[in-house]
Image: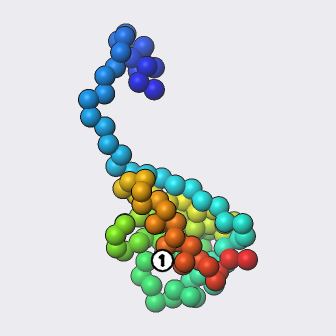
Amino acid sequence: MARKIGRIYGLEYLHVLNFRVTNVVAHMKVDAPIHIYELLCKHKNSKTLEYDPETNSWVKYKHPSTPSFTAFLFPSGKINLFGIKNEANVGVCQMIIQEMITDCIG
């Protein structure tokens, strides 16, 4: 990408002075569908889950503590994780989601 930008602006090399990862997006897929209504019933008193069946088919989960992240859980079994601050936390976020949906897949 840096080479392409360099060619556009006529630069031979583009030197990156400072770089850091500030947002990681991860995608997961479980082998079976996620039963959305079972998930909502299991966590009915939770303020971290949002679901509006009239506008979308996914459930939004906002993790309240560290590591903070947002997950979109689709009935098909696809899960998108957003807002993870570094790559090391991806595994932790995955375990949190797995524990939450264990009884709601199949």
Q: 38 or 3: which is nearer to us?
A: 3
Residue at left offset 37%, top offset 10%: 12
Q: Which corner quadrant holds the C terminus?
A: bottom right
Secondary structure found at label 1: strand
58 left or right, relative to 13: right
Residue 87: horizontal and vertical position, in percent?
A: 43, 53
**Label 1: how many Cα within 10 Å (few below 14, some 14–19, many 20+):** some
44 left or right, relative to 68: right
Q: Quadrant of the rendered structure where residue 78 is?
A: bottom right
Residue at left offset 42%, top offset 82%: 47
27 above or below 49? above
Q: 16 or 47: which is nearer to us?
A: 16
Q: Quadrant of the rendered structure where residue 1 is?
A: top left
Is any part of residue 56 visible from this angle?
no
Question: What residue does disc 1 label?
Answer: 49
Task: Point out the residue furthest to the left here.
Answer: 17
Residue 46: horizontal and vertical position, in percent?
A: 45, 85
